[in-house]
Image (tube, rainbow, N blue to C red):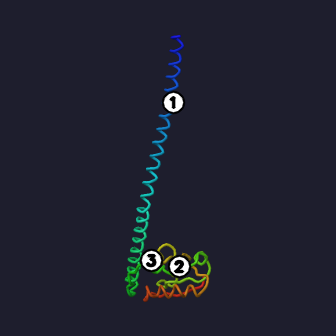
Amino acid sequence: MLKSQKETLEARLRSLEAEQERQEHELADLKELEEVSRLEALLHDNEPIEKRLKAEKAEKTVNLENELEQELARKKNLPLPKVIDKKAINDIELPEEQRAVRHGFVICLLFNAKSPSEWSDEGVGGWREQLGGTAYADQKAAEERLRELKKHFPEYPLVIRKR
C-alpha cells in the first residue's frame, strides 16, 4: 500500500508540475501581450509628433520656395514678391476629378517665356516645371484660381494657357 501511495503522490506531483509549466507559459504570453499593448499605446502617442514633423517639413518647404522666388526676382530685376503663406492660397478646394486632369487650362508664370512655370495645387501649392502644374477642366475654374493667385502675386506675370 505504501508503494501505491508513493506512486499516486508522484503522479500527482508530475501533474502539478505540468500545470505549473502550463501556467508559466500562459503568464509569459500575457507579458508579451502587455508589451505589445504598451508598444501600440506608445505608437499611438507618437502619431501627433509625426504629424507635427510633417507640418514643420511643409513649412520649411514653403519658406524655401519663398526665398527662391525672391532670389529669382532679384536676379531678373523684377519687383520682389511678397512673402506669403502658401497654405492660405489653397483655401479654394477643388474636386478631385479636376486635380487629376492632365489636359485643360493651366496657370503659367512667365518669368521664362520659353519654359514657363505652372501653378500646382498639390501639397502646399507652388510653382512647378512645365506639365507639373494643375490642369483645370474648365476655364472658369482656372480663372477663379488665377484671381486668387494674383492677390498673392500681384507683380507676377501670370496667364492662363490651354494644355
Residue sitting at 46 percent across and 81 percent down?
89
Q: Nearer the viewer, mark 1 or mark 2?
A: 1
Instruction: Name the residue carrying label 3.
Output: 87
As measured in the structure, the alpha-carbon distance from the residue carrying label 2 to the one carrying label 3 is 12 Å
Q: Nearer the viewer, mark 2 or mark 3?
A: 2
Q: Which type of secondary structure does the marked residue at label 1 adopt? A: helix
Please report whichever mark, 1 or 3, sits nearer to the chain's N-terminal start.
1
Q: Which mark is residue 19?
A: 1
Q: Position of residue 59 (x, y in %)?
A: 40, 72
Which residue occupies the foreground of this view, 47 or 89? 47
Which residue occupies the foreground of this view, 78 or 28? 28
Instruction: Name the residue carrying label 2.
Output: 93
Q: Position of residue 137 (x, y in %)?
A: 61, 82
Q: Amino acid at mark 3?
A: Lys
Q: Amino acid at mark 2?
A: Glu
Q: Which type of secondary structure does the marked residue at label 3 adopt? A: helix
- Circle 3 packing at 10 Å, graded few (<14), some (14-19), many (20+), is some
Please report whichever mark, 2 or 3, sits nearer to the chain's N-terminal start.
3
Q: Position of residue 10 (x, y in %)?
A: 50, 19
Q: Is residue 69 above or below residue 40?
A: below
